[in-house]
Amino acid sequence: MSATDQPGPNQPGDVVNTDDGRAPTCNVEGAVKAPVPLEGLRGAVTGKAPLAKLVWFKTGGVADWLFEPADIDDLKLFMERLEGSLPVMALGLGSNLIIRDGGVPGVVIRLGKAFATVEVTGECELTCGGAASGILVASTARDAGIAGLEFLRGIPGTVGGFVRMNGGAYDREVSDILIDCDVILPDGHWVTLPLADLQYSYRHSVLPKGAIVVSARFKGTPGDPAEIGAEMDRIAKARQESQPLRTKTGGSTFKNPEGMKAWQLVDEAGCRGMTLGGAMVSDKHTNFLINTGSATSADIEELGELVRKKVYEKTGVCLEWEIQRVGRP
Ligand SMILES: Cc1cc2nc3c(=O)[nH]c(=O)nc-3n(C[C@H](O)[C@H](O)[C@H](O)COP(=O)(O)OP(=O)(O)OC[C@H]3O[C@@H](n4cnc5c(N)ncnc54)[C@H](O)[C@@H]3O)c2cc1C
């Protein structure tokens, strides 16, 4: 390590990046230390944290603050201390997000390994941490002979994202399998919300703003692991063939309007392959926008708006964004 590589004391405005699981300290006079007192917190608090590397599009600005809690008690303590004084947003794998270039105000909460577990906790029942991936949930269900969760194999997000977005595919969605979920509210209260409280509709829930899903219980039906595995393989293959999976994208850009396919409307409006700056409408799946390498979040969002305009002019249908767009322009 050269002298210039040596970590120095934190300065006001420095990015404080601890990855040893403990909260950082910042002793420089005048520096804004943290959004809450750090004493007793075990997770990492980072100021001006770059988010682009944490989301699929690989674009966007910084979070004013990023908090990566050590566990549920740590998250609860942090939220209690914050007392709703700043906006809070959960970040999963960023597979359905445009983080705007001006960054995200307040605190972004990212759940780590402690929240990524999946356990069989009852008859055809799994309890999954908020940060567990779709593939882990589906594989655990397969190994336990639980059918009905195969569709999660193809959705590249976390349980927290699925619960908020009512993620779904192949005529199944989270509302078909959720029993309940545990949530830390912005004031630090820990509540269990049953399925009915989420009032699910297509890719939408009424989960309160700033609420963090820390775990969810899913139910399935008895099944043969070999058959469940075969269905998961079929889903993986179908995705591979129809979606630009190894690209910087955000999944389906627009919700399918009742009785219609968004990709078809986008195609009919002549938008296949259309570009704006470094953003492009995928020519493999026209409901996917892609960062070809140099896109800003503004490029991607403007291209999406242009597509909406063209679809409206051509078909009279007003497409609704499925991708969540957050932060300052
Ligand atoms: C290639 C590709 C294919 C996709 N295919 C599908 C598909 O078939 N079906 C489908 O439904 N989606 C699909 N998506 C979109 C995406 O995977 C889902 O919307 C998924 O639910 C998002 O999960 P995430 O953890 O990445 O959430 P993020 O993208 O990080 O966040 C999405 C929203 O969920 C909230 N959120 C995330 N974690 C939590 C939490 N712990 N608590 C509370 N809120 C939280 C965020 O605040 C934000 O509002 C696809 C995306 C890609 C890139």
Image (spheres, grey):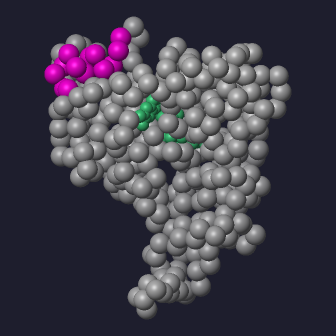
Left or right of residue 13, residue 151 in this image: right
Closest to the observer: 218 or 181? 218
Question: Which portion, as a residue range, is magenta?
Answer: 260-272
Q: Position of residue 172 (x, y in %)?
A: 56, 17
**Quarter of the view holding residue 210:** top right
**Quarter of the view holding residue 268:** top left
In magenta segment, residue 265 = yes
Depicted 114 relative to depicted 45: above or below: above
In magenta segment, residue 138 = no
Left or right of residue 256, residue 160 in this image: right
Q: Position of residue 61 (x, y in %)?
A: 38, 57
Q: Image point 77% across, 55% down: which residue?
A: 73
Q: Position of residue 230 (x, y in %)?
A: 57, 20
Left or right of residue 295, residue 198 in this image: right
Depicted 290 relative to depicted 253: above or below: below
Q: Image point 30% across, 26% down: which residue?
A: 285
Closest to the observer: 237 or 323? 237
**Quarter of the view holding residue 137:** top right
Q: Image point 73% across, 22% down: which residue?
A: 145
**Residue 204 appears in the rendering:** no
Closest to the observer: 53 or 234? 234
In the picture as drawn, the residue positioned furthest to the bottom comes out as 3
